[in-house]
Amino acid sequence: MKVLMVAPPYAGHLNPLLVIAGHLAGRGAVCRFVTGPAKAPYCHELGFGATAVLAGDPDAMERIADTGRRMTGHPLRALRQVSANLRLLPRALPDVQVAAECFGPDVIVADFCAPVAGVVAERLGVPWVTTIPTPFAIEGRRGTPAYCGGWRPVHTPLGTLRDAVGRQTTRTMKRLAGRLFARELAVFGGSLYRSDGTEVFYSDQAIVALGLAELEFERDWPPTLRFVGPLTASPGEPFSVEPVAPRVVEPVEAPPDSNLDTLDPRRPRVLVTVGTHLPWVKRGLVARVVALAERLPGFDFAVALGDAGGTVTPSRVAASVAVVGWLDYDVALRGFDVVIHHGGAGITYSTLRAGVPAVVWPQDYDQFDFAARLVHQGLGVRIRRLDEAAAALPRALALPRPAQDRFERLVRTADPLAAVDRVLDEVVGG
């Protein structure tokens, strides 16, 4: 099988496809990537062919993602970002099409932020599959909508009305965007919706949701969507299904290869991370954590800066605060007692895999919705400012264990790669 993988050059979008490609290569498949210029060499290092899109403007996608300010809650900023994203699509389309024509894939697997892959697949007459780590981004006809600031279900007539208004507002805004950007969306048939009401940005043949249905709120899903479980492993690392017993609540030593043995194992250990983007949040983050540590003398803190090229050797910046450039969550998280994080898909599921409670400090985009789900399921505590963590950390540590144990088991026993095998066999064979 020849599989063309298409994803933007962002860790949370590209890495799951790299893990899938590593698995498929082990089955004898030939995988090739189409991504941004900054990540094409990384794909080559892992043994895959890669084509860089927009090579003449190498940081075009990063400029859009690495914003200098928050987008959520600021309509004009968000509109400018949406505009930049949509204008990029027709520019990227020719590069994706040339790569596909040269490679001759049997199937195209595309991250949900690379919808032009679907246009190319339809032009070439090959099946395509969408992967999405944030399935709640897909519109539904019932249930609590996403991207409304982190709404949680409210089972009252007023809550039902609120949800209906939120869903209709979302669709109205998308239809408006379709009119405003008709030229950019012409390659999708001039509309963001198919005749059956489904969204054209997602495959009508198979949508692979890289998450757990149990974490989601009750709602309807597209008939082609299948939950397969999260992929949190780092590219190049082996993935395994791990049946587990309930976790014993006691201080846990950091694994020897976590590079955090400078932390005191006798005190509660707190990891603080805001992921690989959000540069405007990272500015001053270490200083704020040092101030937080001064208010919590019984805790030890580690700040992971999310710099994939950064050092993995921690440095002490205060008596109870260490800083590290990059951290492999799946390796190190079981050495922590609680995590303060931004609510990204990767860290959310890595924290669940480790059985560690969260203090969620959402900043932008889908993070408010992950925070809502963690709070709703009893898996975390949400804060709006980092200084609120002084009160939230003890509350998170006191959360009942049954929910944490249940979701740890669900994540560890899911077999997403086997499920992806079945999906690809169906769409290619069908």
Image: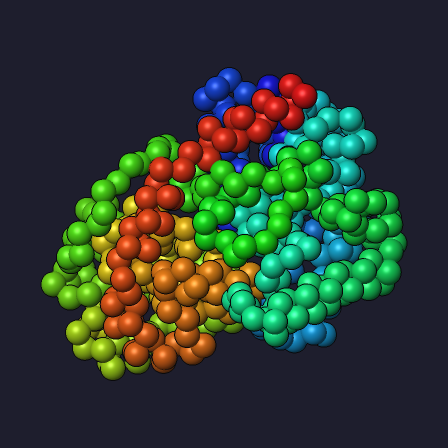
Q: Residue at x 39, y 76 (%)?
A: 386
Residue 271, percent from left and from top: 31, 62
User: Can residue 59 be seen in this snapshot?
Assistant: no
What colour scheme governs how the chains and residues are painted in the rendered image of this protein? rainbow
Q: Is residue 27 left or right of residue 144?
A: left
Toward the viewer: 408 or 77? 408
Q: Quadrant of residue 359?
A: bottom left
Toward the viewer: 334 or 41? 334
Looking at the rendered image, the quarter that the N terminus falls into is top right
Residue 360, percent from left and from top: 41, 67
Q: Residue at x 77, y 49 (%)?
A: 197
Residue 30, percent from left and from top: 57, 22
User: Can residue 75 be seen in this snapshot?
Assistant: yes
Residue furthest to the left in view is 266
Residue 246 to residue 236: above or below: below
Q: Quadrant of residue 300?
A: bottom left
Looking at the rendered image, the quarter that the C terminus falls into is top right
Question: Number of callouts in the render?
Answer: 0
Residue 358, percent from left and from top: 35, 63
Toward the viewer: 186 or 139? 139
Residue 273 to residue 409: above or below: below
Residue furthest to the front in view is 157
Q: Residue at x 70, y 74 (%)?
A: 75
Q: Residue at x 36, y 80 (%)?
A: 387
